[in-house]
Image: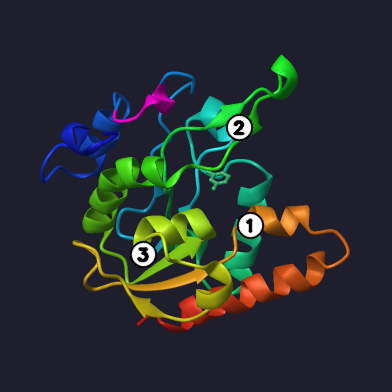
Amino acid sequence: DYDAGPYVPEDAGLPDLRRAAAGCEGCPLYRDATQTVFGAGDPAARVLLVGEEPGDREDRRGEPFVGPAGRVLTRAVEEAGIDPDDTYITNAIKHFKFGRPGGGKRRIHKPPSLRELTACKPWLQAELREISPEVVIALGASAGKALRGSSFRVTRERGVPQPLPLPGGEGSTMVATIHPSAILRADEEREAVYAEFVTDLRVAARLLR
Ligand code: URA
């Protein structure tokens, strides 16, 4: 089955992990994507932010959260009292998954399957082990499922600190919230959705020692 495991060098630091991830063929998503988008930020960060997957822009730039969702995220993180420089940011899967509806040019995001989330998890676990953050913030359902399994539900678990039952995550506490893209998609209720997002992030900020 799909599995990034064989591509992940053992006991490697982040620079070696990043180099190896560039050549990952653990699932078929590498075929249509431009490049692997590995995590970015301070390796000594106390906060690990986990998104879903790179978008169109991230795919072309090779960096996570460089588009509109990233701008909302950075603003909310700061407002919640977390220094953006004290974060490392990555995604549950490292390649952009998309379709071209109608056979056009536009690449439209498709959410990862559980199979793809599971296949890519060895990269996330390696990042978690290397960063060993105090707090892991899961942004949305895909991140939550990658970190806690398929029974994860954002609506039920958001804003509630939980232990992280993963190798490398023993010293970390997880807090889930919505994906920042959900704020961009909300129209009339956008301010309320944003405020609830900041409230969840404040829960994470208070956990920092
Ligand atoms: N959304 C994500 O989940 N990750 C990114 O890197 C960009 C948008």
Q: Is residue 6 visible?
A: yes
Residues in magenta, as a range = 26-30
Instruction: State whether residue 202 is above or below residue 57.
Output: below
Whole-percent x, y for residue 158 in the image: 53, 74
- The image position of residue 50, as x and y in percent, is 45, 55
Q: Nearer the viewer, mark 2 or mark 3?
A: 3
> Label 3 belongs to which residue?
148
- Please rate how many residues cluster around mark 1, counting C-alpha atoms within 10 Å: few if below 14, some from 14 to 19, many from 20: many
User: Within 8 Å: ligand 1 and the Cβ of disc 2?
Assistant: yes
Confirm whether the magenta stretch covers residue 27: yes
- The disc, 2 or 1, on the residue closer to the chain's N-terminal end is 2
Q: Which mark is residue 180?
A: 1
Q: Is 9 placed left or right of 36 in the picture?
A: left
Residue 33: percent from left, percent from top: 48, 23
Q: Earlier in the sequence, mark 3 or mark 1?
A: 3
Quadrant of the image occupied by residue 207: bottom left
Task: State the separation of the CA atoms marked 3 and 1.
Answer: 20 Å
Residue that badge 2 annotates: 57
Amino acid type assigned to the residue bearing label 2 in the image:
Arg
For marks 3 and 1, give the one nearer the viewer.
3
Q: Quadrant of residue 150?
A: bottom left
